[in-house]
Image (spheres, helix red, strand yellow):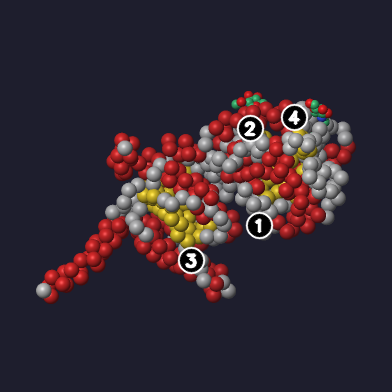
């Protein structure tokens, strides 16, 4: 009697324990865990990966830090679980830099390791690099313990970013480089962002990687004129550069557009060009180059010898040097070039890109091997760009085809002149570049992803995939 009773009582916990064990070592169906040791909301590429996995029927876990909002369609999907890691406790903040760094690495190793081990098993763990410290080692251990596949998505090299601020001779940077080299090779599969990086990984690191270019998300497209008008009206309430010449906020006119009584918007016959740039306001994205170029442009418009329009220059982004330049801009008395440094909601940013006439990119890659995501988004909006030159930029910006490449403020001055000449009616080059970009817009992330990245994750789960197809 006693024995039967005991067995009866032990049965539920045993079944439960077995279930947990099974979950622990056997991945259910197609599953992937995405690790971002940074703000998930500010990692668009990893969110695109997640969306594509979901579209292909994977269960997705995302492990990373909170902060910014993640994309709405990702947030509302029931097949994705987002697990937020705890930041380093504030009590350590006052510690000396090096000690704080060591504490941070230990803290991140422990929190990441525990989070990953507590999750049900994923067949694959996809890591964003950078940062690789401590992700590579921690994820490799977890993969080894549970028999998962480790895949690295190389956006850039972590040590080159460290090197920018600390210098490449710094022992910490050298250690980071060694670590990235050494543990990078432990991954089973690799994805990277450019052909230049693929070659570098192969030649210098012995790592074979598949190139998956960044592509613009669907929200990045040309904004219809009526929506541009509405956006300008909304922005005019806060920012004077969007207001009509009279300077007052009014319901049917902005600096660029006017609407008739029926709710249809039209461009004003002579309107300023809307030039947009987004910068992280750091030393390696020298905003001074743009400022100097526009100072020269301002002088040229004033002389009225050439047929070039006024410019409204909108610069988005936040960063350390923003305040410095904001003061500098405010102290200038220009009459043909005006600036606006707005804070835009995640919904308004693509709308504004889709309404602009010209994009400017001042981003220089730290490794020279990755491409600026903001240009990808601009191209998604059919927006031609002027971009500052660096080694692999040509994989994205084709000089004289979809934009112009410049080296310094004089080059930028010339490029802006060249593109805005005759604007808006006769800016032939700008219009041609715009036309050239329609092809770019039609190749979207998911289609490329299915061709290049999905096969990496497909083989081990092809059976379930086949079952799915036959259903
Ligand atoms: C642009 O063209 C329109 C007609 O297509 C004309 O009404 C307008 O005056 C022109 N604007 C300029 C600045 O030449
Ligand atoms: C892009 O535009 C330029 C005009 O500046 C033209 O010469 C070129 O053939 C176009 N390229 C493509 C691929 O359409
Ligand atoms: C920028 O500089 C590089 C090398 O210094 C040169 O090859 C290239 O032609 C320059 N580009 C422009 C647009 O002047
Ligand atoms: C700026 O570009 C215009 C048009 O190409 C040119 O006339 C002017 O001399 C340039 N200014 C400087 C400082 O290069």
Earlier residue among tags 1 and 2: 1
Q: Residue placed farthest to the left in the image? A: 1
**Outermost residue, front side:** 262
Tag shown at residue 402: 2
Q: Quadrant of residue 120?
A: bottom left
- Tell me which numbered mark, 4 or 2, is placed earlier along the sequence: 2
Looking at the picture, tell me which residue is in the foreground, 296 or 176: 296
In this view, the mark in front (1 or 3): 3
3 and 4 marks in contact (CB < 8 Å): no
Q: Earlier in the sequence, mark 2 or mark 3?
A: 3
What kind of element bears circle 4?
loop
The dot on residue 427 is 4
Q: Are marks 1 and 3 in contact (CB under 8 Å)?
A: no
Q: Quadrant of the N terminus?
A: bottom left
Residue 86: numbered disc? 3
| Residue shown at 27% from the left, 57% from the top | 22
Residue linked to disc 1: 319
Q: For residue 258, which quarter of the picture?
A: top right
Ligand 2 under 8 Å from disc 2 Cβ = yes
Dot 1: what SS? loop
Q: Position of residue 426 (x, y in %)?
A: 77, 27
Q: Is residue 345 above or below residue 4?
A: above
Query: Does label 3 point to a residue whose CB lies under 8 Å from ligand 3?
Result: no
Q: CA distance from mark 1 to mark 2?
A: 28 Å
Spatial CA span between label 4 and label 2: 14 Å
How crowded is the residue under tag 2: few (<14 C-alpha within 10 Å), some, or many (20+)?
many
Which of the two discs, 1 and 4, labels the residue nearer the N terminus?
1
- Helix, strand or loop status at disc 3: loop
Horizontal and vertical percent position of residue 133:
46, 59
> Residue 282's quadrant in the figure?
bottom right
Instruction: Tell me which numbered mark, 3 or 4, is placed earlier along the sequence.
Output: 3
């Amino acid at each position: 009697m006693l024995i039967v009773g005991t067995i009866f009582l032990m049965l539920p916990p045993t079944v439960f324990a077995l279930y947990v064990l099974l979950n622990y070592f056997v991945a259910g169906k197609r599953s992937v865990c995405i690790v971002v040791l940074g703000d998930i909301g500010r990692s668009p590429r990893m969110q695109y990966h997640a969306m594509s996995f979901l579209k292909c029927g994977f269960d997705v876990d995302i492990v990373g830090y909170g902060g910014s909002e993640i994309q709405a369609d990702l947030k509302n999907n029931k097949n994705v679980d987002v697990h937020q890691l705890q930041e380093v406790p504030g009590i350590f903040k006052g510690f000396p830099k090096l000690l704080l760094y060591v504490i941070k690495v230990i803290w991140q190793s422990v929190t990441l390791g525990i989070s990953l081990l507590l999750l049900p098993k994923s067949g694959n763990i996809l890591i964003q690099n950078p940062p690789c410290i401590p992700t590579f080692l921690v994820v490799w251990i977890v993969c080894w313990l549970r028999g998962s596949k480790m895949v690295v998505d190389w956006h850039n090299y972590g040590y080159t970013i460290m090197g920018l601020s600390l210098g490449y001779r710094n022992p910490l940077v050298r250690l980071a480089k060694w670590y990235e080299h050494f543990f990078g090779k432990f991954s089973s599969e690799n994805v990277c962002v450019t052909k230049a990086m693929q070659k570098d990984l192969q030649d210098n690191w012995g790592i074979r990687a598949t190139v998956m270019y960044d592509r613009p998300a669907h929200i990045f497209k040309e904004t219809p004129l009526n929506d541009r008008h509405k956006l300008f009206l909304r922005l005019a309430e806060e920012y004077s550069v969007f207001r009509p010449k009279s300077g007052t906020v009014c319901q049917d006119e902005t600096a660029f557009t006017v609407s008739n009584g029926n709710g249809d918007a039209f461009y004003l016959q002579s309107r300023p060009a809307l030039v947009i740039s987004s910068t992280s306001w750091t030393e390696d994205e020298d905003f001074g180059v743009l400022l100097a170029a526009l100072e020269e442009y301002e002088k040229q418009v004033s002389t009225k010898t050439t047929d070039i329009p006024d410019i409204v220059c909108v610069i988005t982004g936040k960063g350390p040097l923003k305040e410095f330049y904001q003061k500098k801009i405010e102290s200038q008395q220009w009459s043909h070039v005006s600036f606006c440094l707005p804070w835009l909601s995640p919904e308004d940013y693509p709308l504004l890109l889709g309404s602009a006439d010209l994009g400017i990119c001042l981003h220089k890659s730290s490794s020279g091997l990755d491409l600026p995501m903001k240009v990808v988004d601009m191209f998604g909006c059919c927006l031609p760009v002027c971009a500052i030159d660096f080694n692999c930029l040509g994989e994205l910006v084709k000089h004289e085809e979809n934009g112009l490449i410049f080296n310094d403020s004089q080059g930028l001055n010339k490029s802006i002149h060249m593109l805005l000449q005759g604007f808006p009616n006769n800016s032939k080059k700008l219009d041609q570049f715009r036309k050239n970009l329609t092809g770019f817009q039609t190749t979207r992330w998911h289609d490329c992803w299915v061709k290049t990245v999905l096969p990496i994750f497909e083989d081990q789960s092809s059976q379930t995939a086949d079952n799915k197809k036959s259903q």
